[in-house]
Image (tube, rainbow, N blue to C red):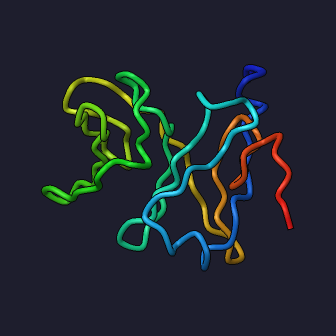
Amino acid sequence: MTSLEDESVSWRLIGPVSELSKKLCRLIYSSDGRDADVCLFHVNGEFFAMDARCAHSGGPLCDGDIEEADGVLQVFCPWHDYDFNLKTGKSSTGLQQQVFEVKLEDGNVYVKHASELSLQPFGQVKEN
């Protein structure tokens, strides 16, 4: 039997690979608010997604440095330099970031998440 929470998790369309692959990291906004926002990383031709706020004290991981060491891609929080593996979310500090599955389908990027996701903040109207 699956829990209600599991049933609400589904694939969320983020946007076209051609556009999203142009930046190393993008902040993806969650309809559940700031604490549920996601960082979408594009490194070495691969996409990774994890919680946007550092598990330590909420630092903005999208502003962090990305480094590869011994074949492991990591993001370093800009506030206190905590490291997080982009694939697993594990840190050498013992902390754990939530990571999300990413899939590419028909030229688009999807992230598996419990809330609606958007490249634009929710509640703001895009001006022409």
Give the image location of residue 2, x and y in percent: 73, 23
For the N terminus, the image quarter is top right
- Camera-side residue of 84 and 100: 84
- Left/right placement of residue 118 relative to residue 78 reads right
- Left/right placement of residue 47 relative to residue 90 reads right
Q: Residue at x 37, y 38 (%)?
A: 89
Q: Residue at x 23, y 57 (%)?
A: 67
For the C terminus, the image quarter is bottom right
- Left/right placement of residue 126 relative to residue 38 reads right
Give the image location of residue 94, x and y in percent: 25, 23
Q: Residue at x 73, y 30 (%)?
A: 32
Give the image location of residue 66, x and y in percent: 29, 55
Q: Quadrant of residue 84?
A: top left
Image position of 54 with respect to 22: above or below: above
Give the image location of residue 106, x and y in percent: 72, 76
Q: Quadrant of residue 38?
A: top right
- Camera-side residue of 59 and 72: 59
Image position of 76 with respect to 80: above or below: below
Q: Report the number of numbered marks.
A: 0
| Furthest residue in direction left, as rendered | 70
Image position of 25 with respect to 87: above or below: below
- Camera-side residue of 114 and 54: 54
Q: Residue at x 38, y 66 (%)?
A: 43
Image position of 88 with respect to 65: above or below: above
